[in-house]
Image (cartoon, helix red, strand yellow):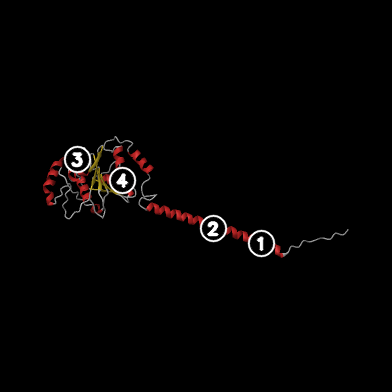
């Protein structure tokens, strides 16, 4: 029996169809990948833009405020040993923190602090999106804080008055203020400090613990001047805090230059004044509307 071999012949169109199908499949895969990549990029970009807009907008969903849990943690650790001499109590730091938070909610907050203390890094952190400047009598302390924390802006100045001179200086000021005499001015305070519209001023230095040490008379006087003549177009009143208000120099100078009518409250040793800006047409500033 003769067997005849049979050959199966594939028509060329079979190859073309298979190859064409595979080619079209790769094109489809490429288009899908392109579509998903483009969509992902577009969505991501829009979300990032929305987050940026929200954070830039005052009072937006993601405003420039330090997250409250972070602020609470900072306050907790800063006041863990609040009974140490010279440190603020928990209630005092919480009061400062609440004012800084309200200030920052309205935009960048300008904070001026007299004295480098245990709370220095706390104030700088709580006002992280604003400007914080420290003024201290110790050149060494300023140098050390700048070395350890380069982002801190601090200046050393000479306080020429002494705590034991309080009554003499106050008497001299009252006699000469009509002649624009300012015996309590800080002569080497950087000029640009006067050009900043300070929203919050804290007086927690110089130390002033003895009659021969630099007192806080000049710092409180300067705080009153800066608040009354608030410059740079800044509107509104200035929150001025004076720590250790129970001491004579702090109490007397606060009454003289920050005024009783501006005292909002006293928490432990921290006095909180809200000092309004006044229109100054000369170098003379009448600090208080009411007599002491």
Which is nearer the N-term, disc 4 or disc 3? 4
Which is nearer the N-term, disc 2 or disc 4? 2
User: Disc 2 versus disc 3: distance between alpha carbons?
Assistant: 71 Å
Residue 94's place in the image compared with 197, above or below, is above
Please, what secondary structure does the residue beneath circle 1 have? helix
Q: What residue is rendered at 16% in x and 40% in y?
A: 164
Residue 52: x and y in percent read 40, 53
CB-based contact (under 8 Å), mark 2 and mark 4: no
Which is nearer the N-term, disc 4 or disc 1? 1
Q: Which residue is mark 4?
A: 100
User: Disc 2 versus disc 4: distance between alpha carbons?
Assistant: 48 Å
User: Looking at the figure, which quarter contains the C terminus?
Assistant: top left
Q: Which residue is mark 1?
A: 19
Please, what secondary structure does the residue beneath circle 3 have? helix
Mark 2 or mark 1, whichever is nearer to me: 2
Q: Which residue is mark 3?
A: 251
User: Looking at the figure, which quarter contains the N terminus?
Assistant: bottom right
Which is nearer the N-term, disc 2 or disc 1? 1
User: Disc 2 versus disc 1: distance between alpha carbons?
Assistant: 24 Å
Residue 122: x and y in percent read 32, 43
Which is nearer the N-term, disc 2 or disc 3? 2
User: Disc 4 versus disc 3: distance between alpha carbons?
Assistant: 23 Å
CB-based contact (under 8 Å), mark 4 and mark 1: no
Pick out the residue farthest to the left.
Answer: 175
Q: Which mark is residue 35?
A: 2
Res. 142 visible in picture: yes
Q: What residue is rendered at 49% in x and 56% in y?
A: 41
Q: Residues within 10 Å of mark 3 (few under 14, many from 20)?
A: some
Please, what secondary structure does the residue beneath circle 2 have? helix
Which is nearer the N-term, disc 1 or disc 3? 1
């Amino acid at each position: 029996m003769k067997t005849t071999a049979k050959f199966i012949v594939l028509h060329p169109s079979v190859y073309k169809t298979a190859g064409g199908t595979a080619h079209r499949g790769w094109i489809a895969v490429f288009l899908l990948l392109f579509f998903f990549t483009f969509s992902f990029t577009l969505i991501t970009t829009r979300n990032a833009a929305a987050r940026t807009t929200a954070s830039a907008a005052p009072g937006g969903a993601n405003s420039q405020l330090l997250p409250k849990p972070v602020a609470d943690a900072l306050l907790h650790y800063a006041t863990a040993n609040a009974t140490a001499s010279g440190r603020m109590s928990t209630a005092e730091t919480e009061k400062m923190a609440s004012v800084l938070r309200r200030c920052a909610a309205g935009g960048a907050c300008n904070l001026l602090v007299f004295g480098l203390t245990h709370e220095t890094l706390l104030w700088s952190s709580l006002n992280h999106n604003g400007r914080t400047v420290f003024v201290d009598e110790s050149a060494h302390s300023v140098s050390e804080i700048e070395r350890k924390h380069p982002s801190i802006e601090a200046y050393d100045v000479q306080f020429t008055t002494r705590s034991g001179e309080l009554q003499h200086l106050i008497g001299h000021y009252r006699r000469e203020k009509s002649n624009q005499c300012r015996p309590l001015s800080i002569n080497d305070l950087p000029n640009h400090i006067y050009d900043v519209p300070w929203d919050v001023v804290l007086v927690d230095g110089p130390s002033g613990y003895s009659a021969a040490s630099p007192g806080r008379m000049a710092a409180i006087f300067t705080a009153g001047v800066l608040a009354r003549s608030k410059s740079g177009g800044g509107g509104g009143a200035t929150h001025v805090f004076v720590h250790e208000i129970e001491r004579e120099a702090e109490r007397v100078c606060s009454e003289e230059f920050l005024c009783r009518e501006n005292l909002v409250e006293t928490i432990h040793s921290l006095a909180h004044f809200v000092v309004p800006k006044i229109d100054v047409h000369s170098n003379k500033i009448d600090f208080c509307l009411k007599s002491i």
